[in-house]
Image (cartoon, rainbow, N blue to C red):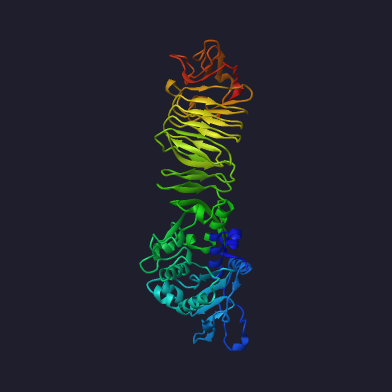
Amino acid sequence: MATAAEIFAAEGKLGFMMSLSSAAMRLRAVDTDPTDGVNTIEVARSGVNAPTVAYQAAAWATATQYLTLLDADDMPALRPVASRSTNFPSIGLESGVFTNRNGAALVARSDDALFIAFRGSNDIDGGIGSSPDSKQWGDRRSDHWKLFQQLDAAIKTYLAQHPEITKVYVTGHSLGGGMVNAFMQSHKGDIYEGVSFGSIRYGKGTSRSDDRVTNVWNDSDIALALGGRADGHNIRFKVVGPDPTGEHMPWLYQAEIKFLAELGYGMDELAGYNRVVFGALPTGLFSSGIGIGADSLTGTGGRDLILGGALSDRLQGRAGLDRIDGGSGARDTAIYSEKSAGITVALDGANWTSVLIGSRTEDLIRNIEDVEGGKRADVLIGDGNSNRLSGNGGADYITGGDGRDTLAGGAGRDVLTGGEGGDAFLFNAKAGKGNADTIVDFTPGVDQIQLENTVFKALGKTFTPSEFYAAAGATKAHDKTDHIIYDTLTGRLYYDADGKGGSGGALIATLEGKPALSWDDFALV
């Protein structure tokens, strides 16, 4: 048999515990000891047991790949006996499943650990209070815990007889998660560790100082609103997409944990974050995909982990020391437009890079292609990707790097350097000295000046050759069609809204090196 450490190395602790929570939902379909005269088959019936579905069967396969299922030969006190219930025909342990009326748990072991997964609510009913599980999901949770007293006593006996067992792991989802907290509240000592998912509160709740208990939950999980939040050492997900009922579904938790594991985040890596933020989309009746949509994700006032995923996401940490990972999307944006201090960041592809707010490091970001700066003077530096870097307010210094970048200074007197590759310099603020930028390295025929049509309204829907005028000393229109004027002596670029000259054009930018501009170096966007 594998050790617990070997299992967790292969599957991750969170991933394996969630698999066990889902496996516990699988109904026992075969009576493996028909000679004892006790029917142990669990029957799916309306209002009692939901039938086993694919994700539960797959989770069972994962559990049995690593663990040895226990039965009455291992825990003789749990030898199955017949009950008087047609819905729940047996009480006892067989083939790794303990049942007592509507209470059930998976019971198995590794080489050095015992694993107990309490079954969550699997009744089919019209609401809380209409069936056995849901009646005990409310104020009668202690009645549900009483169904496991025989199992609890048998576990204590088994541990006394098997000194090689050095750890007991308990897990469960929903009502099963409540039983995790009930178990941990009644068992002291570091030999016990509990991990619950979407758990309802049990009793007065687990102490937040009890770091033996990890409760994983989605912020808007309906179970937490109706059943109270379990405390303990919490990992909290802020997921964009599902409704509160959808946020409670076990397959969503399973998809979330798989997504995190693929990015290298396990239980230890998630510790200390206020929220883990990502998006989710349904991918089937009993499945959800994490990070597969184009999401707008916003953190909290604390330390968050924000994960973008596969498509182009907009990610905003707000306050707190956040980690922001754009994932595999082609155009992920880190947003700092709310910041009143200047930001400094040099993008570095898939490597973590620091974001300074003022002079203080606030965030770490990676896999980010685009950045929206704050309200003051920013320093934004691109990498080898095609970046879109927006300064917004303030006198910004923006450098594109090696890709085909788009640089937008916004309001303020900005300095824009495209770097290698054909770059676009976007002007989307009102022309004038207060917003006039400096372009350091414009190359005609390679780079492009883009003019936002909602700002440069005189250009209409298209920019025509007759609207561009370049000459030595030109600062204003020389006929009524001229709107973009370029002084070839100074490299200054102007906008004349009415084409009449008058007091002169409004300064857009100064191009260092006074490159020879032509009409086709511009685009209206």
Outermost residue toward the left in this view: 204
Q: Using the rendered view, name the quadrant where residue 382 is placed.
A: top right
Q: Position of residue 219 (x, y in %)?
A: 44, 56
In this rendered view, identify the residue nearer to me: 86 or 162: 162
Q: Position of residue 96 (x, y in %)?
A: 57, 75
Whether residue 352 is situated above or below residue 177 in the rendered picture: above
Outermost residue toward the front in this view: 163
Q: Which quarter of the figure is the C terminus placed in?
A: top right
In this rendered view, identify the residue nearer to me: 322 or 515: 322
Whether residue 396 is situated above or below residue 138 in the rendered picture: above
- Count of all numbered marks drawn on residues in the image: 0
Q: Is residue 499 left or right of residue 143?
A: right
Q: Is residue 155 left or right of residue 7?
A: left
Residue 240 in sight from this viewpoint: no
Q: Using the rendered view, name the quadrant where residue 186 is placed.
A: bottom left
Q: Position of residue 222 (x, y in %)?
A: 43, 62
Q: Which quarter of the figure is the N terminus placed in?
A: bottom right
Q: Position of residue 233 (x, y in %)?
A: 43, 59
Residue 186 in sight from this viewpoint: yes
Q: Is residue 357 left or right of residue 46?
A: left
Q: Using the rendered view, name the quadrant where residue 404 is placed.
A: top right
